[in-house]
Image (cartoon, grey):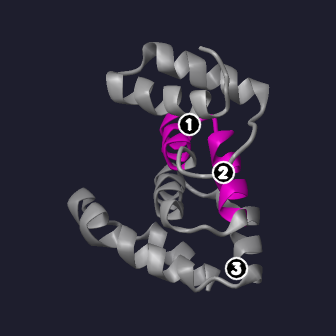
Amino acid sequence: MFSEYDDYLKLDFLVDYWYDEGIDIASKIISKFEENAWDELLANCSLRTTQWKIRCAETLDLTAHPTSVLVLLRLLDSSDKEVMLAAADTLRDKNVEKIPLRVVVELQALSEKGSPPVKAIIGNILEKLDIRQ
């Protein structure tokens, strides 16, 4: 099942299509994951392209599987700011207790330079973790 999800996220989509239909299709695929597919996702998520990682973070919003948080934390620890932001956005609705200090520092720096929506996303996750900005 992971390979179907992986292949789907690699496709070229128009932005509107991705947000209108693609996320729902990818979310349906991920809803059928068994434990081995979750293990594959966790093992491979860091090895994919930026676009794939962002899409992955966006599709994990609708799943309650505990591994989804681990995948998002791995994506949050990315050197790519867009991936970090996508993961932070989805983590706002997840049960996460802590993130590595170096990631907190990166998020704070990103927030300082960010637009109001970026500041809101990061402020929300840091507040949830009870980290003062």
Name the residue rendered at 69%, 46% in the picture: 96
For the residues marked 1 and 3, what is the alpha-carbon distance in whole angstroms? 25 Å
**Residue 53: x, y in percent?**
54, 54
State left or right for residue 127 relative to residue 14.
Answer: right
Q: Against 72, is 43 above or below?
A: below
Q: Residue at x 69, y 39 (%)?
A: 77
Question: The residue tagged with tag 2: helix, strand or loop?
Answer: loop
Query: Nearer the observer, disc 2 or disc 1?
Result: 2
Q: Are marks 3 and 2 in contact (CB under 8 Å)?
A: no
Where does label 1 land, which residue? 80
Q: CA distance from mark 2 to mark 1?
A: 23 Å
Q: Earlier in the sequence, mark 2 or mark 1?
A: 1
- Is residue 86 toward the left or the right of residue 40 in the image? left
Assess disc 1: are there few (<14), some (14-19) or many (≥20) residues with their C-alpha within 10 Å of its C-alpha.
few
CA gap, disc 3 to disc 2?
21 Å
Q: Secondary structure at mark 1?
A: loop
Residue at image position (55%, 77%) is 30
Mark toward the start of the polypeptide (1 vs 3) = 3
Which residue has dot 3 on it? 37
Q: Which residue is mark 2?
A: 95
Helix, strand or loop under label 3? helix
Mark toward the viewer: 3 or 2:
2
> Which range is magenta?
67-90
- Between 9 and 75, the one lying in front of the other is 75
> Is residue 69 rendered magenta in the image?
yes
**What is the crowding at mark 3: few (fewer than 14 residues within 10 Å), some, or many (at least 20)?**
some
Question: Who is closer to the viewer here, 9 or 117?
Answer: 117
Residue 112 got which mark?
A: none
